[in-house]
Amino acid sequence: MLKTVLLLTAALASSAVQAAEVVVYSARNEQLIKPLFDAYTKETGVAVKFVTDKEGPLMARLKAEGRNTPADLFMTVDAGNLWQAAEEGLLKPVDSKALKANIPAHLRDPGNSWFGLSVRARTLVYNTNKVKPGELASYEDLAGPKWKGRLCLRTSKKVYNQSLVATLIGEYGEAKTEAMVKGWVANLATDPFPDDTKAMEAVAAGLCDVTVVNTYYYGRLMEKKPSLPLAIFWPNQDQKGNTGVHVNVSGAGVTRYARNEAEAVKLLEWLSSEKAQNLYADVNMEYPANPKVKADPAVAAWGVFKQNLINVAEAGKLQAKAVMLMDRAGYK
Ligand code: FE
């Protein structure tokens, strides 16, 4: 009798494993991903288990676990991080018509190891009492003498700035980008800030006039303090060699040793679908990566802009160069 029960339990346990589940390692926090996975489970019956941590520890864990990893999908922010995971052999290329159709080419790995799922723009935010939007133009313009003592920046240690500078190198080459970054440093009103929000608060307080931040931090701050004298400006929108606002992604890739590979691909495809894209992007005030899906009205209210179409993978490829360049330029 006992033996029968044990056998039955074992059978149930193994059928439960076979009854489709996906395990996700996520550097996005629980409040952003749980509603999404709950919706997926409701729709498909497939259980989604997840572990959240910072991207560094999760990548180290994937590496240490090797073929024994329980993780099927790795999810994180910034193409620089996704590129790093692919470079370290932690991801497996996925050949999916749905993903190629849903996600524009510049927002996914050319080698198909990872796919952008939401878009954030790294754009300018200025003090509306001190700057007229017509005075702003481009990332490059912020290096000019008219912004002397008027610029605030986040630290160059953050991957977001490393990715921005890396893609600027991809666009303008190293020499021009180095001159640009040196110009920014010369224009700083004060030492770089530890995060985007503090940089914007300094702009609002009048310590400086303009900064460069990710759009969702602006959204979050203005939701909390709508009276702050801050507004978004979309740089590099003219046609004279200026090729658009720098964007980055949050995204995901199937792990190299995924046990539930087919289920991981299905979840990834679902995340890119019109059905899931708003659930994924809106909760963090990001833009859907799938161009068929409209942004949340609160986000759409910031206006339309032309994206830079350089592949976000450049953020990873040129990251080491960007870090060295910022060091040479004295950008702390
Ligand atoms: Fe962030």
Image (tube, grey):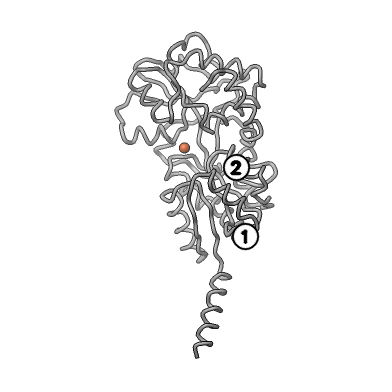
Q: Is residue 68 above or below residue 324?
A: below
**Which residue is located at x 64 percent, y 49 percent?**
90
Element type at marker 2? helix
Q: Position of residue 288 (x, y in %)?
A: 51, 42
Q: Position of residue 85 (x, y in %)?
A: 62, 44
Query: What label does residue 278 carry, if any?
Result: none
Q: Is residue 91 above or below residue 160?
A: below
Reading the image, the residue beneath label 2 is 82
* Residue 14 located left or right of residue 194: right
Whether ligand 1 has any atom under 8 Å from the Cβ at mark 2 is answered as no
Report the mark closest to the observer, 2 or 1: 1
* Residue 112 located left or right of residue 279: right
Element type at marker 1? helix
How far apart are the two marked residues, 2 and 1, measured between alpha carbons? 21 Å
**Which residue is located at x 58 percent, y 70 percent?**
18
* Residue 144 located left or right of residue 191: right
